[in-house]
Image (cartoon, helix red, strand yellow):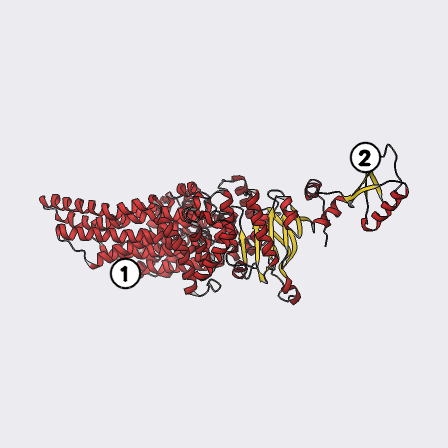
């Protein structure tokens, strides 16, 4: 049966065998069954009562709109509560099995990693989702009989899809957590990394629902499915026999981490010359794909900014560069340019942006890191777009105000963007044969090498150019 | 890490069911298994002996395609452990050190689950389960949940799971560790039965007596390396030296030291016995008997002194004897 895992039906068949056993096991555990039954049968009726009372109460004061918005919100809540159990089931299924030492016999069978992963995902999702759907039905039937309310089809589809996507996100997140924990206790501690973002998500969904912008919910559904895909891929990557049995304890070994970081940072270089040679020949080659992606992203950012100018145009008066003769030099001086103070301000601002982009990038698979960089380039594009609309010479003005220091600043942005992307994406695809921790520290060392060896020197140079050279060129080109 | 050579001696495929070369595994900087090279033929039991953390379980896990080797290669039932993991895992039955049964299940349900995992039909699983449960004397526990099973019963059920799909190769980690003597005997009989049906069996154990009873060959592993391996007799000869003989006489020696052939070395004179060692007992024992008779001594018995595997094991592990490969 499982000798041909490349065959989809065979993969599903194997996964279903695993899932069936786990579901049967859940059905025998009162600690899982009782909350599901309560969430399915009692909680929706309570929500019915709440909805009825709230509608009646706000109706007394003519605030019917609050009631209208509250009912869909409660519909979402009724769907969400049962699926919250999927997180617990998933942690129990992935880490619990390992803790009870029943995983290894399963790993010695012909089941593939994918079949085990999929089977456990299905087992974690099916019962809570079934409970959520039953809960929604109970809630809707109750409402129909109590206040004759029927949900709009679009809303119902959105709530069902959101419920489904949230469950997949939580279970995928649980798998990622499980890969880093050797006990259910440790996994429960790590579960806050799932619970907190999901709570924020529910708050965001509530606000959108009270705002009545159901169209935005579609974007949220899409975003959640994308996150599920990313987490799912990450989970599949982390759920493999080697990692599952290789990890024995959860001790934070800072000494080892520092040693590994140092090793990856120095990479055996005997002197600075060797280190730089390795930086160019190894590190930059290693991040060539992220470099290309970042370049593409920055080009896109420029054009987004450029075309945004058509929609949000600046008044032409602020873009009169032909009247700059008297004010430009004074303006530069007031801004602190042409002085060491100006240089340090520019450099530190860029450094702060780099640090923020890195921190955000780490927690968002590199995405927000790239967005921070996109913002700067987008602003240049927007400025250029407005110049064009105002009938100014875009090339001359950009050459005067941006190009001299951008020659160094843009490569710095590309290199750091690529290193951040690599650092963020490492969670999704750790290096083969390495643990997630090892891969992450390696990527962090790579980021540090690129930052210290390339980006900071480029930013120092760019700030020098921006402080001392750009104003001169600007005065030369713009004041005639 | 390298793969097994694809050009294979067909004669080997027929008989050698497990073959490894320079099999090694590192975890970070820790070398858990270091250059293990071995062969196990059909109908042969190999015992892996070694202290805790010696690398026995890691070796077994590599043979089961659960861990991939960092260096070297292994072929199990003709399948490469890296390139053909599913072929490997379909051909083996692996008893893990911790059985980790599903405690809310019953025995038959448990076996039915693994039957489905191995792709057996319901009829095959039922037939095989019945037979194994009977053979391992587990029928009394059929109505109980596995959580209510004793340690020994759990171990027997885990063994039933391992044998359910009639694998060509069995990898057994401490198969009788938690068992009472009668259960252990049942398990040993099952292993003998499997050996006679031309299966290759690797047993990891601390139980030296069991290894001596079960194993055709023994490999002693320490710090990830196989230090010695061979048949129990070969190991004894190599590690403990020539066989020791004991001749018992009818009358006390009373301080007399009888003359023995020059090629035997007298180790000790007792009240009415003499111990000597001989590199070739078959040839020398008749000479010893003749010489003693000529000197007027009457012999009651002449026997080889028992030397345990434990003695071999302790000497190897304590002295860390290296480079004593038998083959």
Residue B303 % position (x, y) = 77, 44
Chain that bears disc 2: B
**How packed is label 1: few (under 14 Cα within 10 Å), some, or many (20 or more)?**
some
- Is residue A467 something that shows in the picture? no
Q: Tell me the residue that label 2 is attached to.
A: B270
Is A117 above or below relative to B267? below
A142 or A27, nearer to the observer: A27
Cα gap from disc 1 to disc 2, whole angstroms: 113 Å
Residue under label 1: A310
Residue A333: give x, y in percent of width and height.
Answer: 37, 45
Q: Identify the secondary structure beneath mark 1.
A: helix
- Residue B35 at x, y = what percent? 65, 52
Front residue of B57/A471: it is B57
From this view, report whether residue B184 is shown above or below residue A395. above
Q: Is residue A43 visible?
A: yes
Mark 2 nearby-residue class (10 Å; few <14, some 14–19, many ≥20): some
> Residue B138's x, y, as percent?
48, 49
Which type of secondary structure does the marked residue at label 2 adopt?
loop
Question: Is A387 placed left or right of B57 in the picture?
Answer: left
């Amino acid at each position: 049966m499982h000798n041909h895992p490349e065959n989809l039906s065979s993969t599903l068949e194997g996964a279903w065998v695993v899932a069936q056993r786990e579901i049967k096991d859940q059905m025998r555990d009162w600690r899982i069954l009782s909350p599901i039954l309560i969430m399915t049968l009692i909680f929706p009726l309570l929500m019915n009562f709440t909805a009825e009372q709230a509608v009646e109460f706000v109706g007394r004061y003519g605030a019917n709109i609050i009631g209208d918005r509250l009912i869909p919100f409660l519909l979402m809540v009724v769907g969400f509560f049962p699926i919250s159990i999927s997180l617990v089931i998933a942690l129990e299924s992935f880490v619990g099995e390992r803790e009870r030492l029943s995983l290894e016999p399963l790993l010695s069978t012909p089941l593939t990693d994918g079949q085990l992963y999929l089977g456990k995902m299905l087992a974690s999702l099916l019962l809570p989702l079934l409970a959520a759907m039953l809960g929604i039905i109970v809630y809707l039937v109750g409402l129909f009989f109590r206040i004759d309310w029927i949900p709009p089809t679009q809303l119902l589809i959105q709530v069902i899809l959101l419920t489904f996507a949230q469950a997949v996100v939580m279970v995928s997140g649980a798998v990622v957590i499980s890969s880093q924990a050797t006990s259910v206790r440790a996994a429960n501690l790590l579960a806050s990394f799932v619970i907190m973002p999901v709570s924020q998500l529910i708050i965001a969904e509530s606000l959108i629902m009270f705002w009545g912008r159901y169209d935005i919910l579609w974007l949220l559904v899409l975003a959640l499915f994308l996150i599920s895909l990313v987490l799912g891929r990450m989970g599949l990557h982390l759920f493999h026999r080697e990692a599952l049995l290789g990890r024995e304890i959860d001790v934070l070994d800072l000494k080892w981490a520092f040693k590994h970081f140092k090793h990856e940072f120095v990479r055996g270089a005997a002197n600075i010359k060797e280190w730089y040679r390795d930086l160019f020949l190894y590190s930059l080659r290693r991040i060539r794909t992220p470099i290309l992606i970042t370049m593409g992203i920055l080009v896109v950012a420029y054009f987004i900014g450029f075309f945004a100018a058509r929609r949000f145009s600046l008044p032409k008066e602020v873009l009169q560069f032909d009247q700059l003769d008297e004010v430009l030099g004074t303006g530069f001086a007031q801004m602190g340019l042409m002085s060491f103070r100006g240089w340090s301000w520019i450099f530190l601002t860029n450094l702060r942006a780099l640090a923020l982009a890195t921190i955000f990038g780490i927690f968002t698979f590199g995405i927000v890191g790239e967005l921070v960089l996109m913002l700067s380039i987008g602003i240049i594009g927007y400025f250029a777009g407005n110049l064009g609309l105002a009938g100014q010479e875009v090339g001359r003005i950009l050459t005067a105000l941006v190009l001299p220091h951008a020659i160094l600043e843009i490569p710095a942005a590309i290199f750091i963007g690529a290193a951040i992307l690599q650092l963020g994406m490492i969670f999704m695809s750790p290096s083969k044969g390495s643990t997630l921790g090892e891969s992450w520290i390696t990527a962090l060392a790579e980021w540090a090498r690129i930052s210290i060896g390339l980006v900071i020197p480029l930013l120092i140079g760019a700030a020098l150019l921006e402080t001392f050279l750009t104003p001169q060129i600007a005065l030369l080109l713009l004041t005639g | 890490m390298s793969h097994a050579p694809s050009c294979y001696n067909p004669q080997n495929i027929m008989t050698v069911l497990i073959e490894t070369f320079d099999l090694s595994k590192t975890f970070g900087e820790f070398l858990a298994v270091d250059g293990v090279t071995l062969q196990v033929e059909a109908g042969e039991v190999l015992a892996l002996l070694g202290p805790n953390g010696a690398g026995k379980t890691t070796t077994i896990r590599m043979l089961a395609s659960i861990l991939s080797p960092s260096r070297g290669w292994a072929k199990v039932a003709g399948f490469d452990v890296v390139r053909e993991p599913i072929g490997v895992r379909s051909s083996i039955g692996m008893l893990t050190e911790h059985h980790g049964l599903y405690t809310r299940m019953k025995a038959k349900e448990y076996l039915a689950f693994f039957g489905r995992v191995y792709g057996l039909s319901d009829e095959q699983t039922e037939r095989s389960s019945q037979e194994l449960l009977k053979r391992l004397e587990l029928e009394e526990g059929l109505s109980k949940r596995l959580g209510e099973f004793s340690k020994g019963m759990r171990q027997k059920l885990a063994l039933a799971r391992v044998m359910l799909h009639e694998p060509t190769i069995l990898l057994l980690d401490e198969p009788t560790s938690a068992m009472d003597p009668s259960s252990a005997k049942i398990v040993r009989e099952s292993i003998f039965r499997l050996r006679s049906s031309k299966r290759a069996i690797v047993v990891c154990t601390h139980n030296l007596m069991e290894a001596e009873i079960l194993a055709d060959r023994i490999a002693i592993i320490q710090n990830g390396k196989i230090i010695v391996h061979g048949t129990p007799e070969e190991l004894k000869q190599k590690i403990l030296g020539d066989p020791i003989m004991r001749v018992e006489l009818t009358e006390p020696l009373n301080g007399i030291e009888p003359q023995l052939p020059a090629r035997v070395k007298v180790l000790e004179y007792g009240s009415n016995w003499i111990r000597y060692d001989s590199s070739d007992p078959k040839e020398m024992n008749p000479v010893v008997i003749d010489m003693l008779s000529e000197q007027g001594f009457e012999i009651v018995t002449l026997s080889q002194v028992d030397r345990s595997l434990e003695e071999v094991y302790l000497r190897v592990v304590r002295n860390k004897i290296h480079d004593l490969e038998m083959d």
